[in-house]
Image (cartoon, rainbow, N blue to C red):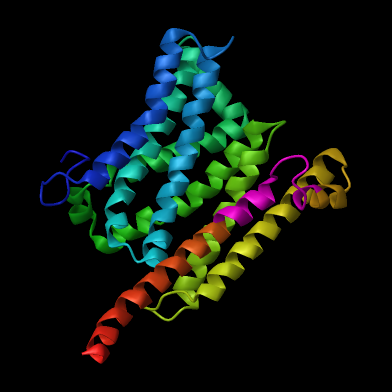
Amino acid sequence: MYPWLDRSGRLSWLKLLVFIGLLAPGTWAAVNLALGTLGPRPIMEAIHEVGLWAIRFLFVALAVTPLRQLLQWTPLVQLRRQIGVASFCYAFSHIILYTVDQSFDLWKVASEIVLRIYLTIGFIALLGLTALAITSTDGMIRRLGGKRWRRLHQTVYGIGVLACIHYFLQSKADVGEATVMCGLYAWLMSYRVLMDWVIPKGKMMPIWIVALLGVGSGFATMLGEAGYFWFKRGIDPLRVLNANLSLNIGMRPGLAVLAITLGLTLAVLVRMLAKSAARARPRLASAGE
């Protein structure tokens, strides 16, 4: 089935627009690589670019279920497979470009993966994404059975951890976006734990808990960044925390996570108010007759 069709075989404009959006970063990287406009080391820049989008799309795929539940927008669920497969495609392109950069010396590529811990972690994550992509079809769901298929695809949470570590380790000097990813992952996993173990089945998470999760994830990110710079570079944690609470040097990771998660909280609140207003209209109309 083409990725822009729904389950009945009809064109889905939502899936088509998302498919175009998923293709856009790879197309941009390919065009600029062909034009030679990616800087002095174009292949290395392309490697970083497609690897970055692999992780971004993995996190978007992880966010589909929380967004669908919180925003109560069912069509989102049909996008999860599409986005997850895109993440695999970008991750696979990432290692192919790395092989090209190593002049197709497969022995060197293999030895680098074994000897460099961040490459080992990234390769394990790629193997996991490969397994999930291969088993993402309806036919594989039937062959594996729903229970085994769900158990296999729950490994995506572990793959998310590996992706965060890989991104963080290879970032070296600039760990800003990698830190944001870690903070968002903390939010996603906290949400999942609460929905599975605390919130009654079939119930929506209360808005105040969603807001608290956002604040907690934002401040946890700030503390994590402060701890990293203290441990790695000996920088006073209070300096990093102060920087996170100020916009004088730009938006730090903790504030970015706080802005994203509280932005989601605001969207959920708007959605709830809109639904309440829609339910109130018939009652007001009836009362006015």
**Residue 20: x and y, percent?**
31, 34
Q: Which residues are magenta?
A: 243-260
Residue located at (22% from left, 40% from top): 3
**Residue 185: x and y, percent?**
55, 53
**Residue 85: x and y, percent?**
33, 40
Residue located at (42% from left, 43% from top): 128
Residue located at (41% from left, 31% from top): 90
Q: Is residue 108 visible?
A: no
> Is 255 contained in the magenta span?
yes
Count of numbered marks:
0
Residue 142 position (above or below residue 92): below
Residue 134 position (above or below residue 24): below
**Residue 48: x and y, percent?**
54, 26
Left or right of residue 244: residue 99: left
In the picture, which quadrant includes the N terminus? top left
In the picture, which quadrant includes the C terminus? bottom left
Q: Residue 154 sits in which quadrant?
A: bottom left
Residue 135 position (above or below residue 202): above
> Is 259 contained in the magenta span?
yes
Q: Is residue 27 visible?
A: yes
